[in-house]
Image (cartoon, rainbow, N blue to C red):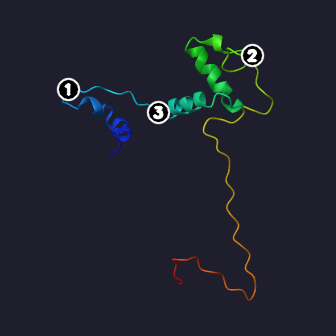
Amino acid sequence: MALATAMYHTGFNPLKGVRHGRSEEVETIKGLKQRRLHKAFLRYHDAENWPMLREALIQMGRADLIGAGKAHLVPAWQPRGTGLKSEGYRGARPDPAPAPAVPGHQQRTPPGRRRR
């Protein structure tokens, strides 16, 4: 198991030695909302994330990072048509249409596959 995977699943730092009752704990974010917030902070330049970031910055007491200047993380205004998607919205994925059959043409079998 990779070190990062071991840290995530156990909650302990394997580099410091894992001992009963004396292991160094590592905080791992496993909640969906918290993970999305972390991703939004990494992509702070995306206008879709600005409403979530504004709310989080106000809750953290860092409303000074909201504004239009260079020292600000997100602007106080929202561009029209952005930030409307609800949390977890990914959009409907259309089902891929099957390729139309050509009369008199046999479909090619990909390499490594047998015909049934």
Foreground disc of the pair 2, 3: 2
Name the spot of residue 27 as percent of width and height, x first.
38, 27
**CA gap, disc 2 and disc 3:** 31 Å
Name the spot of residue 50 as percent of width and height, x first.
67, 26
Judged left or right of residue 73, residue 79 is right
Three-letter code, disc 3: Gly
Q: Residues within 10 Å of mark 1 (few under 14, many from 20)?
A: few
Foreground disc of the pair 1, 2: 2
Name the spot of residue 84 as percent of width and height, x first.
72, 33
- From the image, tell me which residue sits under label 3: 31
Judged left or right of residue 109, residue 69 is right
**CA gap, disc 1 and disc 3:** 25 Å
Mark drawn on residue 68: 2
Q: Secondary structure at mark 1?
A: loop
Q: Residues within 10 Å of mark 3 (few under 14, many from 20)?
A: few
- Relative to 71, is 93 above or below? below
- From the image, tell me which residue sits under label 1: 21
- Relative to 61, is 96 above or below? below
